[in-house]
Image (tube, rainbow, N blue to C red):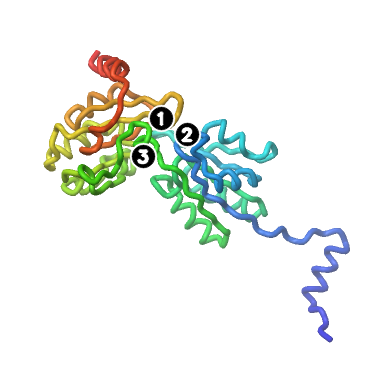
Amino acid sequence: MRHPSDSQRRADRLVVLGGKPPRAPGAVWLVGAGPGDPELLTIKALKALQGAQVVVHDGLVSDEILDLAPAGARRISVAKRKSRHTYSQGEINRMLVAFALEGLNVVRLKGGDPFIFGRGGEELEACREAGVACHVVPGVTAALAASASAGAPLTHRGSAQAVTFVTGHAAKGAEPDLDWTSLARPNHTVVIYMGLSMAAPIAARLMAAGRDPATPAMIVENASRADERRVVTTVAGLAEAAAALGGPALLVIGEAMALAREGEAENETLLKEARA
């Protein structure tokens, strides 16, 4: 017959005397909330959100999506804006790990997809290093929503045999160090996240690398949301068009953008405002 060890006897004694056994670790879910339209949330994302005890969310996640979490779930905004961060990335990483180690089910809710310029990779690494279970739920990234609403495919047999996603911001607001020669190739769609304020230097770099100034381009602000705005232009006109917008926006450049739909009256109004 196997006898209990001294450590087991001590643990049993603690329970008998009113002590509580340690809580089982929780888990972190990195969940893509999509570009904004609640109907673009995946079923898996919805299920993860409905099981959350803590929701750590971006500033761009809508209240409609946040309200899908249980009423008793704790909500923490870690909104990031240019040069204004509520929490540093390191603090967010430690927060996720700490809540999970307390035995809580934590949803890190991100706009778009966690692994496309969402710092999900850094959060996944932090969880792995701490021994915390981490699950990833992909989301519809803004480029897909912008492309769909504009009727302009990111790939097309005749005019876009490749698509590249890049960021318009490097660390500390510097110009991104990109392979401009590659991005300037024809029949290649380039999607630039967080590039609105860098539209002028980006356009200049592309043209200097050989991209035709007449290449179609569009800027989409608040893709998939009720207040989405879209300006259709060219690489040469990108800087002027960007000056008319101020919200979260994508720059999309490539021959296939010639298929983009636009509200002609609104487009003209925005460009006139930029020139004023």
Three-letter amino acid code at disc 3?
Answer: Ala
Q: Which of 263 and 240 is in front in this view?
A: 263
- Residue 81, position in %: x, y? 43, 33
Quarter containing the C terminus:
top left
Disc number placed over residue 143 in the picture, else none: 3
| Distance from the alpha carbon under mark 2 to that under mark 1 | 8 Å
Give left or right: position of 241 versus 34: left
- Residue 259, position in %: x, y? 26, 33
Residue 48 vertical placement versus 262 (above, below): below
Residue found 56% across the figure and 62% down from its top: 131
Secondary structure of residue under mark 2:
loop
Residue found 80% across the figure and 77% down from its top: 6
* Residue hosting label 2: 36
Write down the quadrant of residue 20 in the picture. Answer: bottom right
Write down the quadrant of residue 133 in the picture. Answer: bottom right
Three-letter amino acid code at disc 1?
Answer: Asn
Q: What is the residue that sits farthest to the front in this orientation?
A: 157
Q: Earlier in the sequence, mark 2 or mark 1?
A: 2
Residue found 16% across the figure and 47% down from its top: 181
Residue 243 vertical placement versus 136 (above, below): above
* Residue hosting label 1: 222
